Image (cartoon, rainbow, N blue to C red):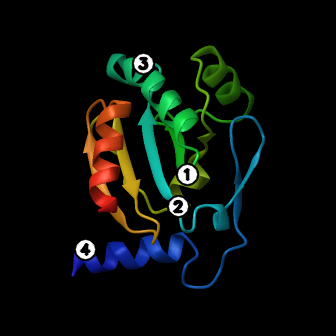
Amino acid sequence: MRKWLWVTLVIAAFGLAGCGSEQWRDHQGEAVARTELQGNWVVVNYWAEWCAPCLHELPEFNRLAAARPDIRVFGVNYDGVSGEELRELSDRMGIAFPVMGQDFEKSLELERPQVLPTTYIFNPAGELVHSLPGPQTEASLLALLDQDRN
């Protein structure tokens, strides 16, 4: 029952049940529309500046985002940093993929992770297919995504 409720919430959050006009702003001020997520694999990574494993894995997510534009990669700062402070922090850390605010997290009905880093993977239907605690690599994520596609 809980899994079904979660899937229903995620589908509704992605706008697959009707509403698709919602949009968010990333740390650079660029708009990301909910409709851009539909039909794409979406990877959401929670990180924090004080988290050593997060700092080591962020370049892996930069490589994934650059190598695979068909996979939408997003970051969420665990500490809730926002606005200009989030832009400066993300720039200082060399993050090349969109870092979203808490409104993105809440709209997608993401659970606040208990472990950092944590990565969530959604399939093109908007279903949460993986919740990955701990550091990830570009290779491990691509292997998992390739496996799910087959």
- Quote the CA–CA distance across marks 1 and 4: 27 Å
Report the amino acid beneath label 2: Asn
Q: Nearer the viewer, mark 2 or mark 3?
A: 2
Say which of 66 and 15 sits in front: 66
Identify the image quadrant of the N terminus. Answer: bottom left
- Residue sitting at 45 percent across and 63 percent down? 109
Q: CA distance from mark 3 to mark 4?
A: 32 Å
* Local secondary structure at mark 4: helix
**Residue, x 53% and y 35% (percent of image)?**
67
Front residue of this view, candidates 26 and 96: 96
- Counting from the top left corner in percent of width and height, residue 77 is at 51, 35
Left or right of 104, for residue 132: left
Q: Is residue 128 above or below residue 29?
A: below
Residue at numbered disc 1? 70
Q: Are marks 1 and 4 in contact (CB under 8 Å)?
A: no
Going from the N terminus, do you reach mark 1 or mark 3 first?
Answer: 3
Which numbered disc, 1 or 4, marks the residue closer to the eye? 1
Q: Secondary structure at mark 3?
A: helix
Pointer 2: residues within 10 angstroms few (<14), some, or many (20+)? some
Q: Residue at x 69, y 36 (%)?
A: 27
The type of residue carrying mark 3 is: Leu
Label 1 to label 3, Cα distance in Å?
24 Å
Q: Quadrant of residue 113?
A: top left
Contact flag, marks 2 and 1 (Cβ < 8 Å):
yes
- The residue to which callout 4 is attached is 3
Q: Which residue is mark 2?
A: 40
Residue contact at pointers 2 and 3, CB within 8 angstroms? no
Is residue 136 found left or right of 108 in the rendered image? left
Q: Which residue is mark 3?
A: 55
